[in-house]
Image: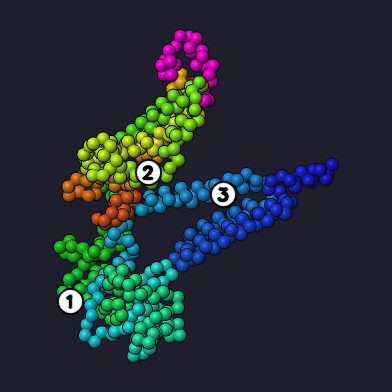
Amino acid sequence: MDAVQTASRQRSPGYAGTSLTGLVVRITLLGVVAALAVWAVLPLIGARSWIGVGVVAAATALLFWIYLTPNKRLPLKYLVPGTLLLIAFQIVPVLFTLSTSVTNFGDGHRGSKDEAIVSIQTASITQVPGSPEYDLAIATGGDDTLVFILSDPATGRYWAGDADGLKDLVPADVQKGLSGKITEARGYTILTAAEAAERSQEITDLAVPVDGGGIRANGLSKAFKGTSSRAYDQACDCVRDSVTGEVWTADPETGYFTDAAGQSLPQGWQVAVGLDNYTRVVTDEKIRGPFLSVLWWNFAFAILSVLVTFGLGLLCAIALHKERLRAKFLYRTLIVLPYAMPAFAMLLIWRDMFNQDFGLINTMFGLDVGWFSNPWTARFAVILVQLWLGFPYMFLVATGALQAIPSETLEAAKIDGATGWQAFRRITLPLLLVSLTPLLISSFAFNFNNFNAIQLTTGGGPFAAGNSSVGATDLLITYTYRLAFGGQGAQYGFAAAVSVFIFLIVATVSVIGFRRTRAQEEIYR
């Protein structure tokens, strides 16, 4: 009897005496966890992010403690991995977005104040008579960062220089060709003339900071050590120009160095701005109007996308729900085909089909409509594209829900004298909505943030003359993308604030929808 109980315990999951296969699998998985932890910790140590190191170490220790102990912690073995993934991929991004939304992070405010000072000083570097000159080779580091490989013909010394400063190189690690040009440097990839020419702007902009100035390229084979005309004075917390005598004083509220006339240097630093990014949506007339215009269309797009796709999908599902209908499998396969194709490819095809000059739609119907030139035709076009892409999914879920409705319920309605329309409106549709409302809510949330549907078809346009920041078909997500990565300058802090608005809107709609779903379930229970 004892032997039977022992064998039973050994077969139970999580028990210390698991089989050899289970032990090997466990050790392998924990080894992968340890490797990932080391991979994550090394860059954190390099960045001196000790809090991050502590979090990774604690999570790794927790996993080892749980999975190297016996049966009594079995529930944790299932709950902890999901919880950690939830924190890593949901909570952390949300917290990061919130923290970014209360800063001025963006173009001109990407780094710290010290980095801004270095950028200001290196940007004012000029060559003066007698400046040291160096032989130059353009190279890249391991992460494709641009690097200057420098050599001093007089002393025979070599350096590698980037935006962080100079680093000495061992002469044995550098090789020169017959012409005297540097051809190899250990740890770096020397660019060819053609490759360097493609990055000419980066080469021109790069200044390697050194005491009193910096090193800039003079063509692709020479470099010089220049003197900075602008220097930071810690006593007044300001930047002085030794040539013009101008002074720019640090403004901790805006993150800029500003002169007496209110003019700022282009290089700033990241500072906390509180709720300014959120209040801009309400108080700034240039922001409030476009934001509200995008918001109403965003709601209209999401609601119409759900309604038209659900309506057509349900209609097809009802039509193919007839028991006597032949070749139902073939019809259902044909209907599902759009859903089986890659959405991004179909969106590009539809974009070309709406082309005014050679698009299939204008050619087929003999039209000359500039679909993406007029706001209303562009909106109609994207809704039509959504209908074609989305109704197969609604057809599938509606078909499954229809098959789950007891046939006895509909037969009883017929016996009571209900017409087909009455049975559908009072019985079939309410029962469908009970089971499908969560899916409709998720579809609304998806379409509310359907970036691809807009970006790959209209690109957010058409745009009003002189305003390329907001288009007639823009959703909040495409508007946010343009704020963050647009050609007019990135505004990551403000874009993060708009993202928080999107989250709150979708969350509110979802909560209201799920509450109504529970109310329906109680009625039809």
In percent of width and height, residue 137 lies at: 35, 78
Horizontal side of residue 210 vs 522, given as left or right: left
Q: Are marks 2 and 3 in contact (CB under 8 Å)?
A: no
Q: Is residue 137 visible?
A: yes
Pointer 2 residue = 346
Q: Are marks 1 and 3 in contact (CB under 8 Å)?
A: no
How far apart in space, not on screen, are marks 2 and 3 (Cα)?
37 Å
Crowd class of label 2 (few under 14; some 14 to 19; many from 20; radius 10 Å): some
Specify how the rendered protein is coloured: rainbow
In percent of width and height, residue 118 lies at: 30, 71
- Between 366 and 134, the one nearer to me in the picture: 366
Pointer 1 residue = 243
Q: Amino acid at mark 3?
A: Pro
* Residue at 68%, 56% in the rendered image: 24
User: Foreground mark, 2 or 1?
Assistant: 2
- Between 30 and 319, the one nearer to me in the picture: 319
Q: Amino acid at mark 1?
A: Val
How far apart in space, not on screen, are marks 2 and 1 (Cα)?
60 Å
Q: Amino acid at mark 2?
A: Met
Crowd class of label 3 (few under 14; some 14 to 19; many from 20; radius 10 Å): few
Please, what is the dominant secondary structure of the magenta stretch?
helix
* Residue at 41%, 74% in the rendered image: 189
Horizontal side of residue 410 vs 473, given as left or right: right
Q: Which residues are magenta?
A: 403-426
Pointer 3 residue = 81
Q: Secondary structure at mark 2?
A: helix
In percent of width and height, residue 359 lies at: 28, 43
Q: Earlier in the sequence, mark 2 or mark 1?
A: 1
In percent of width and height, residue 202 lies at: 30, 69
Q: Is residue 337 magenta?
A: no
Q: Is residue 511 above or below residue 257?
A: above
Which quarter of the figure is the N terminus placed in? Answer: top right
